[in-house]
């Protein structure tokens, strides 16, 4: 692949201390050395197929389509991957890089816990020490995933600073990385952070879009009219979108967490409501945490920034970004469960909610692909406690 300067328009970069720049430069060299290497990609493909269970199906949701009453709805079933979400794609890619540079310790951040579980899984697979930082609030609402990580041998470190959610988990992981970079590999979970992480995550997650392109051509004989995915940091969305970026007839829509309402002050819609700034070593659209309570019913979406490539897509108009409230996401959670027998993650439910809404406005000959980025097992206790109180 062509080398990048680390920017997507004005977004991205590496706004980090000089000591960390040296480490990131080494990581960039490692990434470019192996991303087109035949042996590396052969090994990655082996684990994708034999361990993750790829390729994931592109499923025509007939009853959901009928309920919406318009365009055909297809679901890209990343929920069927080993560990239950798209996160395993990137975790495998990055740990194979870590192996090649002989790192003895892996650290990661996690929000909903799916990236933490994926990281703990690949560390168990290859026998590498694993530490996962997780906001204390997320530890409580994602106890199921915390237990899974510990079962897999990971050390889960609760973070009590600030809002005690994903942002603070990233803060702590970066602190650890600065102090221990000589023997530690930071396995970043989303398409955020300083260069080269957004680029790396995009490349490893683009397997989603490459498969979806091939599958929709096989099933419909043409490309979809719309691609829809939820947006927190943006890894599942960029994985679906990027292989279609040059297909101008394909509309790309990212669905942000509208929380309790876009005017409530309780949401995490960075693109829709944020301003340009720097967070965690990169430039993107970012929310002012003094005026906004970073909130989403979905633990994996409550991040106050967004990937630099999504920020660029927004500014250039290549993708559209909308929002869905907690209530709408929960309604979609139940709707997909009852209509298709598929229990989605609360994160993915945001995409499902907007996909149904959009489908109802379109003619029946239009095609929508929704990235079902994860399954809802991890959310069961939260849903049970919540009931319909939202």
Image (cartoon, rainbow, N blue to C red):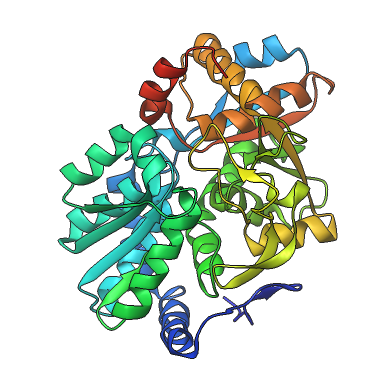
Residue 154 at x, y = what percent?
21, 53
Horizontally, residue 357 falls left or right of residue 377, namely right
Quarter that holds the N terminus: bottom right
Measured along the vertical axis of the image, is residue 306 above or below residue 240? Answer: below
Can you see residue 189? no
Could you tell me which residue is drawn at 66 percent across and 25 percent down? 353
Could you tell me which residue is drawn at 36 percent across and 74 percent down? 177
Q: Quadrant of residue 224?
A: top right
Horizontally, residue 318 falls left or right of residue 377, namely right
Residue 71 at x, y = what percent?
76, 22
Measured along the vertical axis of the image, is residue 94 above or below residue 81? Answer: below
Horizontally, residue 85 falls left or right of residue 206, namely left
Can you see residue 336? yes
Residue 229 at x, y = what percent?
63, 40
Looking at the image, which is closer to me, 390 or 70? 390
Residue 286 at x, y = what percent?
68, 58
Q: How many circles with numbers are drawn on the protein?
A: 0
Quarter that holds the C terminus: top right
Looking at the image, which is closer to me, 342 or 245? 342
Horizontally, residue 310 falls left or right of residue 81, namely right
Could you tell me which residue is drawn at 38 percent across and 65 percent down? 173
Looking at the image, which is closer to me, 154 or 35? 154
Could you tell me which residue is drawn at 46 percent across and 81 percent down? 24
């Amino acid at each position: 692949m062509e080398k990048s300067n680390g920017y997507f328009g004005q977004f991205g970069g590496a706004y980090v201390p000089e000591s960390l720049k040296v480490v990131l430069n080494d990581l960039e060299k490692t990434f470019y050395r192996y991303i087109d290497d035949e042996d590396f990609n052969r090994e990655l493909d082996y684990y994708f197929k034999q361990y993750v269970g790829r390729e994931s199906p592109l499923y025509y949701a007939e009853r959901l389509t009928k309920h919406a009453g318009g365009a055909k709805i297809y679901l890209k079933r990343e929920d069927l991957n080993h560990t239950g979400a798209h996160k395993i794609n990137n975790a495998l890619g990055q740990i194979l890089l870590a192996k090649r540079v002989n790192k003895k310790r892996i650290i990661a951040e996690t929000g909903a816990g799916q990236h933490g579980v994926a990281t703990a899984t690949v560390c168990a697979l290859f026998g590498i020490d694993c530490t996962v930082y997780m906001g204390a609030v997320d530890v409580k609402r994602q106890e199921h995933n915390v237990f899974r990580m510990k079962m897999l041998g990971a050390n889960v470190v609760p973070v009590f600073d600030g809002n005690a959610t994903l942002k603070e988990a990233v803060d702590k992981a970066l602190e650890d990385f600065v102090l221990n970079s000589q023997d530690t590999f930071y396995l970043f979970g989303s398409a955020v952070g300083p260069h080269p992480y957004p680029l790396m995550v995009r490349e490893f997650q683009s397997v989603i879009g490459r498969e979806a392109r091939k599958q929709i051509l096989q099933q419909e004989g043409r490309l979809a009219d719309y691609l829809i995915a939820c947006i927190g940091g943006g890894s599942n969305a960029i994985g679906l979108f990027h292989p279609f970026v040059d297909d101008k007839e394909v509309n790309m829509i990212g669905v942000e967490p509208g929380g309790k309402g876009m005017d409530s002050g309780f949401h995490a819609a960075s693109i829709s409501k944020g301003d340009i700034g720097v967070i965690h070593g990169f430039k993107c659209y970012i929310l002012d945490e003094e005026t906004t309570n970073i909130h989403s019913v979905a633990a994996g979406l409550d991040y106050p920034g967004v990937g630099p490539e999504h920020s660029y897509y927004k500014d250039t108009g290549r993708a559209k970004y909308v929002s869905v409230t907690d209530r709408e996401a929960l309604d979609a959670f139940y709707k997909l469960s009852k209509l298709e027998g598929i229990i989605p993650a609360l994160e993915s439910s945001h995409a499902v909610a907007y996909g149904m809404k959009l489908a109802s406005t379109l003619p029946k000959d239009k095609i929508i692909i929704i990235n079902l980025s994860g399954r809802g097992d991890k959310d069961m206790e939260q849903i049970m406690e919540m009931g319909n109180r939202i």
